[in-house]
Image: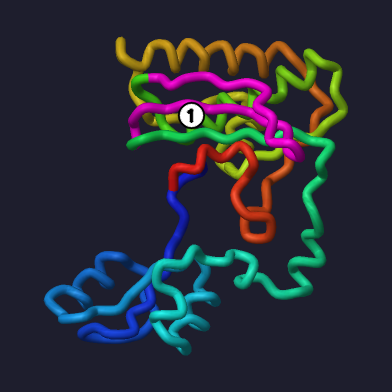
Amino acid sequence: MSKTKKKYYVIWQGHKTGVFDSWNTCKKLIKDFPGAQYKSFVSKEHAEEAFKGNYFDFVGKKEDLKSSLTKAQLEKIGQPNYNSIAVDAASSGNPGIMEYRGVDTKSNKQLFIQGPFEEGTNNIGEFLALVHGLSFLKKHNSDRIIYTDSKTAMSWVRKKKCNTKLERNTINKPVFDLVDRAEAWLKANTYKTTIVKWETKAWGEIPADFGRK
């Protein structure tokens, strides 16, 4: 997946109630408060709406990201283009064990997968997945578009450079070997594939997601 997303915290019962944009603040306001009621949301609008309601209407339920968008916004976004593939990565820790894959957007059929590698980051995985997807589509002379939920990966591909801060070592050498190959491929090849940002709020998790949230 992409870098950690901003979250908002609703406190229905605590030393202070309301909507807060910092987990550290939330922790202080619920610490040592008997029966504290709180929950995180990815949308400020949804958090503010939830605060008006009851804690028990939200606890234990996955946030409906669509509810943070207006009807007009949903209509403007529309539906995914199923003449496409989707790519994503997963990392257990940052850095940590990393892998990435690409799937058919409509059927979820896995088209390629790499890893797990002993040490990598989510951003590196997203970058490698996107370049692998571009290479895959060019090899098959496909007119499909490619979806990613990582703006960072899209930026790195445009620059033809993996701008990770992770330092090379013997453990992550297999990952950086792939990074070198990916950068070389971008510099040596042209492609007509359109790279599109996956609209997670409107469509849910990207089909290539590893489901480890």
Tell me which residue sits at (44%, 48%) in the image: 213
Q: Overall secondary structure of the magenta stretch? A: strand
Check if residue 105 falls in the magenta segment.
Answer: yes
Q: Quadrant of residue 135?
A: top right
Where does the image place residue 140, in percent across and percent down from the top left?
81, 16
Where does the image place residue 1, in percent across and percent down from the top left?
51, 41
Q: Is residue 1 left or right of residue 120?
A: right
Q: Which residue is mark 1?
A: 124
Between residue 69 and residue 62, name the one nearer to us.
Answer: 62
Tell me which residue sits at (62%, 24%) in the image: 160
Magenta stretch? 94-117
For label 1, the crowd category at 10 Å Cα-Cα, with few meaning under 14, some 14 to 19 and many 20 or more, is: many
Where does the image place residue 71, in percent across and percent down from the top left?
75, 74
Between residue 131 and residue 190, name the one nearer to us.
Answer: 131
Residue type for callout 1: Ile
Secondary structure under tag 1 reads helix
Placement of 144 over or under 58, stated as above or below: above
